[in-house]
Each structure stands twice: as structure tokens, then as C-alpha cells.
Image (tube, rainbow, N blue to C red):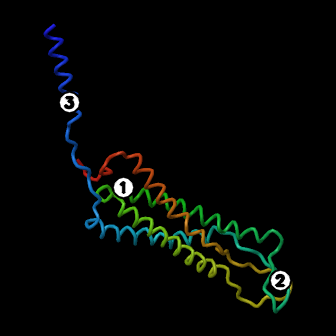
Amino acid sequence: MRESAGTAQRENGTAWARVFAVEPPRPKVVVKADLLPALTVLSMVGLLGIPIGWIWSMLAPPQRMRVVSADRDPVPLQLESWHRFDDLAIFLLLGFGAGLLAGIAVWLLRERRGPVILLAAITGSVFAAWLGMRMGIAFAGGRYTITDAPAIGDVVVKGPVLESGWALLAQPLGTALAYGTLAAWNGRDDLGRRLG
């Protein structure tokens, strides 16, 4: 009987200890120490736009057009205008894939995990998508230049184009999705910044 009373008292004491336990303070967001690494992340992710633009210029299909008169622009052949969508879709897929890879790579910077680096990676992805659009169109324009003046009835090849600004959203979306998924999966208050 005394044993059970002592056991009940100990259990009751541990229950009160759990209620009044002092939790360690939550880690705060580190801003000042992460600013220089964030600038590095922004520039490195932003430079991804150059290879994305080059790969897009190699993969995107050109548009074949017929010259109908000297004073009018060439007219696309039948079904060739659909390549404008193909060009956009290829760029979106390349950007989304590069964004996923950038988000995973930035997450692997364990000592710098947090919202400052995430915002830098997303901003760098927006810049990379913009740079990829500009460089891709420039690379494609150099690849599909018309050297001789075409005659009426000739079929010329026009380089791929990106006509929608929505193409800028795929890469930042991929970066935020990858980083956010890994942060949610982590489940630690400090996102595993401390190496101990």
C-alpha cells in the first residue's frame, strides 16, 4: 500500500513537472549574419539563366514561314504557329527543373538555412528566368539568322520566341516549392542550422 502511494506521488510530481517545465527559447531568425551569403546565393542562382537560355535555344523548335510579299511579314506555314506554345512549354519546364535543383542546393547550405536565404534564392530565380529569356532569344536569334534576302514564295526559318511574361514564374515557383517542402519535412525549430 505504501509503495503504490509513493508511486502515485512520484507520477503526480512528474505530471506537475511537465506542466511547469520551462522550454528552451525558440531560435530567432538570423538576418545580419546571413546577408552576405544571401547576396552570394542570389548571384549564383541568377547566373543559372545563361545555361538555361542556351539549352532552351537548342531545344526549342523554330517556326517555318513563307514569304508572301516584299512589304509584308512572312506568314507561318500550317500548324507551325503551334511552335510558339512549344517554345514556352520547354522554357517553363527547364525553369521549373532548374528551380527545383536550386532549391535543393540552397537547402544543403545547412549553416545558412532560413527565410533570408530563401528570399535570396527566389529573387535569384526570378533574375535567372529573366536572364534566361533574354539570353535564350539572343542565342536562338544568332542560330537562325537569315543571311540572304528571301524571294517571294521562299520558306524561311524564324527562331523560337517567348511571347509571355508568365515564363518568369516557373523557376521561382520550383525554388520555393523545393525549399519549402524540405523545410516542412525537417521539423526542427532551427531548421537544423546547428551542427550538433
In screen coordinates, is 167 left or right of 180?
right
For disc 3, the neighbor class at 10 Å (few under 14, some 14 to 19, many from 20) is: few
Q: Residues within 10 Å of mark 2 (few under 14, many from 20)?
A: few
Residue 33 horizontal/vertical position (percent): 25, 66
Residue at image mark 1: 108
- Looking at this rendering, what residue extends furthest in the top direction? 1
Residue that mark 2 sits on = 154
Q: Residue at x 41, y 58 (%)?
A: 105
The relative height of residue 135 versus residue 172 in the rendered view (above or below) is: below
Q: Amino acid at mark 3?
A: Trp
C-alpha separation, residue under disc 2 versus residue under disc 3: 89 Å
Q: What is the C-alpha distance between the residues marked 1 and 3?
A: 41 Å
Residue 170 horizontal/vertical position (percent): 55, 63
Spatial distance from mark 2 to mark 1, Cα to Cα? 54 Å
The location of residue 146, given as percent across then percent down, is: 71, 85
Three-letter amino acid code at disc 2?
Asp
Q: Nearer the viewer, mark 2 or mark 3?
A: 3
Q: Which residue is mark 3?
A: 16
